[in-house]
Amino acid sequence: MTSHIDTSKLDEPILDDRDPVYADYAYVVDGKVILSDWHAITVREFKIRINAKEIRRCDTYGRSEQFFGRAA
C-alpha cells in the first residue's frame, strides 16, 4: 500500500541552526523522516554531520493521521 503524505497540511517548520537536536527524536531531513542518533548538538552541527541542507520538525501525529486516516 502506497500512501501520499500532503506535507502542506503538516506543522513542520524549518528549524533554526541554533535549535537543539535530541537523540531518538524524528526530524524531516531534506524531505525524508529520520530518527536522530545525536543528542545535545545544534541543528547546524547536525546538518554538517549528516550532510543535510534542511532540517524540519517532524509532525508525527499529522503524518499518522494522513497515512492511517486517523491518529495512531
Image: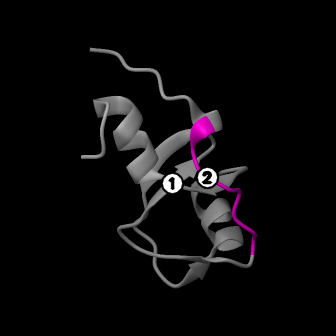
The residue shown at (30%, 38%) is: 70
- Colour setting: one colour
Q: Secondary structure at mark 2?
A: loop
Please, what is the three-letter code of the amino acid marked with disc 1?
Cys
Residue 13 painted magenta: yes
Please give the label number shown on residue 58. Answer: 1
Q: Which residue appears at 41% of the width and 51% of the height?
A: 60
Give how far across and how far down residue 11 sits, in percent: 59, 52
Vertical position of residue 66 compared to residue 19: above or below? above
Closer to the N terminus: mark 2 or mark 1?
2
Measured Cα–Cα span from mark 2 to mark 1 = 6 Å
Which secondary structure lies at badge 1? Answer: loop
Residues at marks 2 and 1 touching, judged by CB atoms closer than 8 Å: yes
In the figure, is residue 46 to the left or right of 15?
left
- Residue closer to the observer: 58 or 45: 58
Bounds of the magenta span? 9-17
Give the labeled residue for mark 2.
Answer: 12
Q: Main secondary structure of the magenta part?
A: loop
Q: Most extreme residue toward the top, as rendered?
A: 1
